[in-house]
Image (cartoon, rainbow, N blue to C red):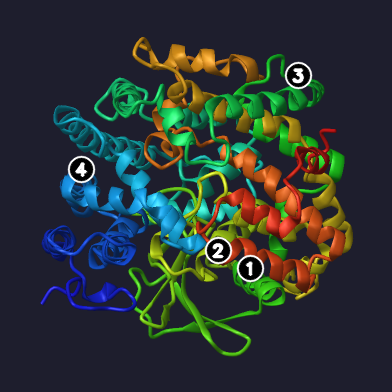
Amino acid sequence: MNPLLSPFDTAPFSKIKNEHFKPAFLQAMEDARAEINAITANSEAPTFENTIETLEFSGQQLDRISSVFFNLNSAETNEEIQKIAQEVSPLLSEFGNDITLNEALFIRIKSVYEQKDTLNLSVEQNTLLDKRYKSFSRNGANLSKDKKQRLREIDAESSKLKLKFGENVLAETNKYQKHITNDADLEGLPDGAKEAAAQLAKAKGKDSGWMLTLDYPSYIPFMKYAENRELRKELSLAFGSKSFKGDELDNQEIVLKIANLRHERANLLGYKTHAHFVLEERMAETPEKVHSFLNELLEKAKPAAEREFKQLEDFAKDLDGIDQLQKWDGSYYSEKLKQKLFSLDDEQLKPYFKLENVIDGVFQVAEKLFGLQFEEVSDIDTYHKEVKTYRVYDLEKNFISVFYADFHPRAGKRAGAWMTSFKSQWKKDGENVRPHISNVCNFTPSTKTKPSLLTFNEVTTLFHEFGHGLHGMLANTTYPSLSGTSVYWDFVELPSQVMENWCYEKEALELFAKHYETDEVIPMELVQKIKESATFQEGMATLRQLSFGLLDMSWHGADPTNITDVKVHETKAFAGTNLYPDTPETCMSTAFAHIFQGGYSSGYYSYKWAEVLDADAFAYFKEKGIFNKEVATKFKEHVLSKGGTEKPMVLYKRFRGAEPKVEALLERAGLL
């Protein structure tokens, strides 16, 4: 019996074998098609209930199987799973097109949509109807037959290219291994990082020495602390040239193809560019607004960034006689300068951030703000022994959510950190079906002598992903497609980014920042230094984020058909934001997974956009007290629980009483 085709609540990971996936996908697609056919064959006149609602709750088995499979493909993949992904992705894309290009279905939806003003729908029903109609019209339902066929071809090809892009980047990341045998090459590297590198060398079958890779927990400490400039250069160039070597893992052709297919698709649907298509469903609304937002911030941040860069250049010159600061010098000298200015480094902070304590801390913050309680349990199946599982309750002991936490790097796990869900939240037949939410990160693992101690950056990452997690856990909507993080893309980062603010507050840090050996609470002068250093090189950091946003818009906000050279195009896009000399052998676009593999195309600006929202929102907490119940309840009721049921600006104004102001961000960043 295929465990994926039997009804299940939490995912039955231990029973699932790779060979179960493809048959399960095929069967679930067939079942979902039958559900769609039942809607179109209904002889009754189309109504909201028999068409829109029935469609909303169709294909749930397929959704569950997809979420289990694609989460594994990110967090615990292997060649077999990747091969299945290549096989089922075009089938799923085709299935999605079969629905959105189903004329009989669209006629019923359009019929309901055209009488929406007379139907007396709730706000959420109205949003669902609007979203459903647009999901058809924005995917070609109003197109002629030959154009529909071309759309299908574009979508099938795009889904394969995106997967190939990601596989190439992962393969490039895994391919680079630097075995170090001379202790002197690791001069400056903290003991914890050295021990982790020695452990990695053993795991990779070496009898002695240390192993460096391009995975963040290995790469970042080396770039930040290692004195060996030549080795830093080698690692930096390896990292920056991922899938840009003209070999079988090269992504240049793939990037050009994806950009052109997206542009062609947008044109088919009547939009000027891919960005015009995407932004219609975002808070930002148009590419013009995104450009003016990015340029306004650029204008404010650039003078500060140039001052900071000059300071860094002078510092490196005085310290080591460096004439020309290069990209592989940035982290290293920034860290040294930061230590000089604030006498603060990550190694000083890490003992206060034992992973278990930070997890406990984020749970306490969630309890104080939103009345949640987390109970670790061992009776929920997981896909790897490192995954922790929790049941979440409110203060009245009502069940809220299942929560999975997976924190350390492994060979089958992609880099970075993300939140995802194995099951959405919805209400049906009088039952409020609760969600299953997961946070996946790549934090420094424990070693023989030390527990997992997080850098401060990793602490903020944990809080960030947990903010997304809360958005999923506290969902309280009727329809699954409007639940949790199913919101406009440039609104989705608000709950995550706002949570990071608690990491800088004395009241919150006292709950969990305790020395792993002595249990001593983090000294307040360190907290003060964390706060002061938070705006250190903020101009440079802002410029970097803006450069990524501008690169994204350069690929998607204009006609890409004349771009023939990926690197030349990228260099132009970066022209206004460059501080370091260019390195000809590196290219960001070929490994820019956010926009070419993930869902951030025409949306990378949303990180900064959400920072404006989060700075403005947290200013409200600061004003009333960071654990103020009234503000927290408003945030929970109007933002976290509402999902995508209404336009984000409406929800935000209900919480805050006004639109967000860019000044809150500039002030917090010290850029005013």
Measured as percent of width and height from the top left, residue 520 is found at 80, 73
- State the SS at label 4: loop
Instruction: Please state which amino acid type lies under the numbered disc 4.
Output: Leu
Please tell me in which quadrant of the rendered image residue 367 appears.
bottom right
Instruction: Please state which amino acid type lies under the numbered disc 2.
Output: Lys
- State the SS at label 2: loop
Question: Which badge, 4 or 2, is on the more N-terminal residue?
Answer: 4
Tell me, for residue 642, which label it has, or none.
Answer: 2
Measured as percent of width and height from the top left, residue 596 is found at 38, 34
Q: What residue did someone put label 1 on?
A: 637
- State the SS at label 3: loop
Q: CA distance from mark 2 to mark 3?
A: 56 Å
Q: Decide: is 544 above or below 442.
A: above
Disc 1: CA contacts within 10 A as few (<14), some (14-19) or many (>=20): some
Q: What residue did someone put label 3 on?
A: 321
Judged by depth in the image, the label closer to the viewer, 1 or 3, is 1
Please tell me in which quadrant of the rendered image residue 147 appears.
top left
- Left or right for 60, reference 232: left
Name the foreground residue: 183 vs 115: 115
Measured as percent of width and height from the top left, residue 513 is found at 74, 68
Instruction: Please state which amino acid type lies under the numbered disc 3.
Output: Gly
Q: CA distance from mark 2 to mark 1?
A: 7 Å
Disc 3: CA contacts within 10 A as few (<14), some (14-19) or many (>=20): few
Seen as rendered, the residue at the extreme bottom is 396
Judged by depth in the image, the label closer to the viewer, 1 or 4, is 4
Measured as percent of width and height from the top left, residue 291 is found at 60, 24
Q: CA distance from mark 1 to mark 3?
A: 56 Å
Asked if residue 230 shows in the view, the reply is no
Asked if the residue under mark 3 is in contact with the one under mark 2, i.e. CB atoms within 8 Å, the reply is no
